[in-house]
Image (cartoon, helix red, strand yellow):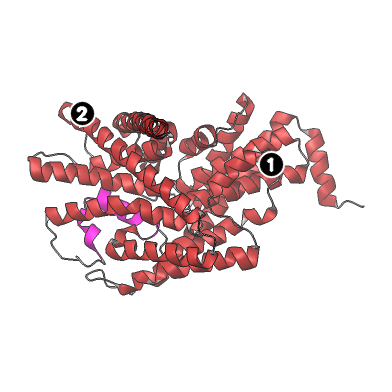
């Protein structure tokens, strides 16, 4: 079979470069393409979401929230079953499985299908994130770049890691956090040169997405205050609270995944999961989509936005109402996210933990100020909680720490974020061991 000029060019390029040079070149190309893909995903989700909610009234309850999420998940299910004829949700889990089974040749449709499906899921209000789909798409981009050059399987494995990390780096605009995704979450064994390639891909993807979006961050955080010695004990308590909540969050997610897995009828699964998300969003509209807009409002000191578009929408909500709303959101957030991701929607699990962490920190500080007469900086604690819950729920503390700090570009807050995230991580590990011991005791005592 006669090869095209482009194929001959690729072969000559591969033959003229060493493995290290080839890996760097592929990482740059993968990062560039993935950065563009992440930007397009963000724009698609924003366009659909804005089109749906732009005419809704924030001063009262909006019954359309009971319809939109159901439509989004059903459309996503139809797209997977009748257009792709494949299931693509839980992208990070499927990517980890592919790597463990040494299936490094990801099909070409994965470079765009997760983006289309995630746009439908999140644009219509699915309460999850876009990082899972873009990581899956980024890995497919890296795989296909490597396959076009006909590289060895070990280099192709490295390119899956490069693409996945590039996707996380671009969607969160956090290059170091993105690089830690492959090291902590995917647990890919990488050589020194491969680690360098992962960082190159992450930096390239971050810069591409950052430049395309007008050199802006997704979440602004300008009202933070300097951490004083008197605040540190409460940061420690926040880490313990977030760790306990993270354990609850993870357990609910685990049980809901098993519940939806047992449902064999895909239409019933889509409708039920969509209904669960819809009810959660109707009661707590801040759960709509990824939640970055609400996080930005909380970090700007406008926590009263928690009541907007809801049954409890008031101009001057009382602190007690805000605390109750935050508590309700903490309880139902894992239900909404697991229903979005396991009921047929295509979305991610990381952004929801950041959102839940923001609410957890906000709830902790506001409750302490209201009922204990303290004067904790609410916005700071909301920010610290973002990393703490992510570290505990995802069990990836390094990724959580750098990803959250990079999202707002305030590295001066690295130490308190690290403390809160580390304590949360340790608490979840400890509670997990206790739960396993109790299960073992009950199981063997009953037998």
Q: Position of residue 411 (x, y in %)?
A: 35, 34
Query: Residue 232 got which mark?
Result: 2
Residue at point 23%, 46% (across, down): 362
Magenta span:
289-308
Which quarter of the figure has residue 249?
top left
Camera sees residue 200: yes
Tell me which residue sits at (32%, 33%) in the image: 424
Residue 285 lies, with reference to residue 428, above or below; the image says below
Residue count near mark 1 (Cα–Cα under 10 Å), binned few <14, some 14–19, many ≥20: many
- Residue tagged by mark 1? 104
Tell me the SS state at disc 2.
helix
Give the numbered dot on residue 71.
none
Residue 44 visible in the picture: no
In the rendered view, tell whether residue 53 sits above or below residue 365: below
Using the numbered discs, state the Cα–Cα distance from disc 1 to disc 2 in whole angstroms. Answer: 46 Å
Looking at this view, is 246 or 136 the one in front? Answer: 246
Q: Could you tell whether 30 is left or right of 437 in the image?
A: right
């Amino acid at each position: 079979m006669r090869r095209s000029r482009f194929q001959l060019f690729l072969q000559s390029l591969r033959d003229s470069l060493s493995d290290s040079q080839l890996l760097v070149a592929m990482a740059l190309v993968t990062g560039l393409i993935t950065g563009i893909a992440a930007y397009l995903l963000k724009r698609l989700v924003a366009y659909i979401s804005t089109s749906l909610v732009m005419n809704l009234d924030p001063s009262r309850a909006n019954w359309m929230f009971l319809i939109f999420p159901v439509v989004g998940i059903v459309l996503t299910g139809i797209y997977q079953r009748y257009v792709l004829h494949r299931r693509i949700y839980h992208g990070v889990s499927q990517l980890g499985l592919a790597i463990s089974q040494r299936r490094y040749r990801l099909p070409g449709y994965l470079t765009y299908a997760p983006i289309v499906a995630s746009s439908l899921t999140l644009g219509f209000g699915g309460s999850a994130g876009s990082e899972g789909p873009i990581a899956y798409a980024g890995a497919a981009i890296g795989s296909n770049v490597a396959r076009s050059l006909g590289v060895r399987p070990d280099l192709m494995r490295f390119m899956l890691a490069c693409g996945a990390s590039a996707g996380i780096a671009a969607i969160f605009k956090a290059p170091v956090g993105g690089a830690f995704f492959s090291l902590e979450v995917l647990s890919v064994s990488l050589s020194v040169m491969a680690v360098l390639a992962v960082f190159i891909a992450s930096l390239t993807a971050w810069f591409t997405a950052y430049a395309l979006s007008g050199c802006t961050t997704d979440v602004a955080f300008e009202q933070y205050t300097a951490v004083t010695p008197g605040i540190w004990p409460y940061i420690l308590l926040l880490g313990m609270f977030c760790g306990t909540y993270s354990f609850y969050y993870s357990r609910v997610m685990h049980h809901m995944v098993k519940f939806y897995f047992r449902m064999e009828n895909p239409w019933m699964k889509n409708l039920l999961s969509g209904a669960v998300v819809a009810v959660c969003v109707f009661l707590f509209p801040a759960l709509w989509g990824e939640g970055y807009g609400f996080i930005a409002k909380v970090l700007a000191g406008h926590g009263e936005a928690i009541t907007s578009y809801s049954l409890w929408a008031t101009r001057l909500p009382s602190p007690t109402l805000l605390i109750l709303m935050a508590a309700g959101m903490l309880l139902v957030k894992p239900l909404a996210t697991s229903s979005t991701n396991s009921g047929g929607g295509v979305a991610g699990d990381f952004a929801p933990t950041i959102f839940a962490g923001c609410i957890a920190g906000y709830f902790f500080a506001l409750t302490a100020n209201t009922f204990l007469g303290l004067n904790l900086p609410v916005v700071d604690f909301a920010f610290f909680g973002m990393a703490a819950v992510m570290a505990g729920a995802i069990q990836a503390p390094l990724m959580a720490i750098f990803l959250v700090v990079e999202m707002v570009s305030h590295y001066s807050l690295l130490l308190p974020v690290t403390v809160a995230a580390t304590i949360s991580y340790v608490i979840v590990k400890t509670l997990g061991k206790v739960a396993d011991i109790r299960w073992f005791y009950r199981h063997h005592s009953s037998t």
